[in-house]
Image (spheres, rainbow, N blue to C red):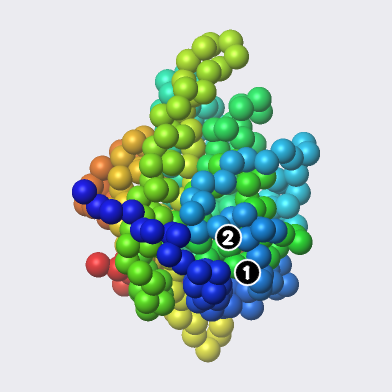
Amino acid sequence: MLRDFDYEKLSYEDRRSIHDALAETTLKHISASDGLFSSLDFDPAAHPSQILETTHLAPVPVAEGEPASLAATARHDLFHHTRDVLARQAGFTSAARVLLDHHGVNIFPVTNHGTIEDIAIWSAAWLEHLDQDTWQDQNGLVISRGVTTIGAFGMAASEVVEKGGHVFMSFPRTETIERLGFDASLIDTNNRTMRREVHAWLGEDLLHKVLRHKLGKTLNIAWSGKTDAVQYGDDHKPDRVSMGKVGNGTLDIVKRGLVLPIVMWDGGEPFVEIGELTKVETAKDARKVQEWQRGTLAKALGLSIDAVEVEA
């Protein structure tokens, strides 16, 4: 049996150093955000998401239309384009509601992850198609713990997304995280605890006020755990794109429902394409979905299929 990490052995300075190391990995996202993001100091009393023991943030009260307003402020063109794409898919969104509300099926929208905020933008548009009495309990988002080092709208970005539903925080198993040299058991414990929290949320009995049965949940995931690596040419357009692979921990989550593949790109003209609901249980299944994302992204960017790759 795997032993959980002993958080009590961490001093305040240890915790600050973990925060600062994570913050170094988010500087590129802050500089590319056109002023949306800022660096956030380590202050767990003010920002509870920075407490390492916490892996699940519950939804917070919001005003009507607040998630949409925040998303539109963050990425106006991408959010409204995503909204428009969903509006043109009325048959699909109605069928998804039937699966969620009448059959208790969980749906996992998964993006290629062109930018750090695209999955939150998708989530804000998607939740408008959920039952408006229960959407906050039905909607969830997985984010990297690195997001706890970023400020947005005067608060931690990790806590902004609580306005859109449940938030689950992971240490993505990427080369960037591995290079930070964190204790492996810290990462293992965080991610194992997070998955337990996700499984509990997916399985809890949220009773519909009239139909009295368990409602399905939607958990929005940038499922490779890393933003796409993009090489740009002299014309400042993408020449090559590399997407990360899907890890076993993510597979353990998404096998509990249906995957909804999404391709998003926030370039000169935003692009959003929705794939087919798919059962994903193995790495081979995930690879097939990523091959669809790969081909769709290549076509959208006007690249050859060889110019877009998925990590082996």
Q: Position of residue 157 (x, y in %)?
A: 64, 59
Q: Nearer the viewer, residue 211 or 300?
A: 211
Q: 2 or 142: which is nearer to us?
A: 2
Tell me: 93 left or right of 240: right
Give the answer, above or below, for where 47 lies relative to 100. below
Residue closer to the observer: 298 or 222: 222
Q: Secondary structure under badge 2?
A: helix
Number of numbered callouts drawn: 2
Mark 2 / mark 1, whichever is N-terminal: 1
Percent position (x, y) of residue 208?
Answer: 56, 17
Residue to which mark 2 is pinned: 50
Q: Is residue 308 visible?
A: no
Q: Is residue 185 above or below residue 14?
A: above
Q: Residue at x 37, y 76 (%)?
A: 181
Quadrant position of residue 226: bottom left
Say if mark 2 contacts mark 1, CB within 8 Å.
yes
Residue 47 spot, x, y in % from top left: 66, 58
* Amino acid type, callout 1: Phe
Disc 2 versus disc 1: distance between alpha carbons?
A: 7 Å
**Is residue 75 toward the left or the right of residue 257 in the image?**
right
Counting other residues with Cα less than 10 Å from the Cα at mark 1, is it few (<14), some (14-19), or many (20 or more)? some
What amino acid is found at the position of numbered circle 2 in the picture?
Gln
Quarter location, residue 166: top right
Secondary structure, mark 1, is: loop
Q: Where is residue 295? Give x, y as percent.
A: 36, 60
Quadrant (top left/top right/bottom left/bottom right) for the C terminus: bottom left
Task: Looking at the picture, tell me which residue is in the foreground, 115 or 11.
Answer: 11
Q: Which mark is residue 42?
A: 1
Q: Is residue 43 visible?
A: yes
- How many residues crowd around disc 2 within 10 Å: few (fewer than 14), some, or many (20 or more)? many
Residue at (32, 62) in percent of width and height: 185
Residue lying at 73% horizontally and 72% vertically, measured from the top left: 35
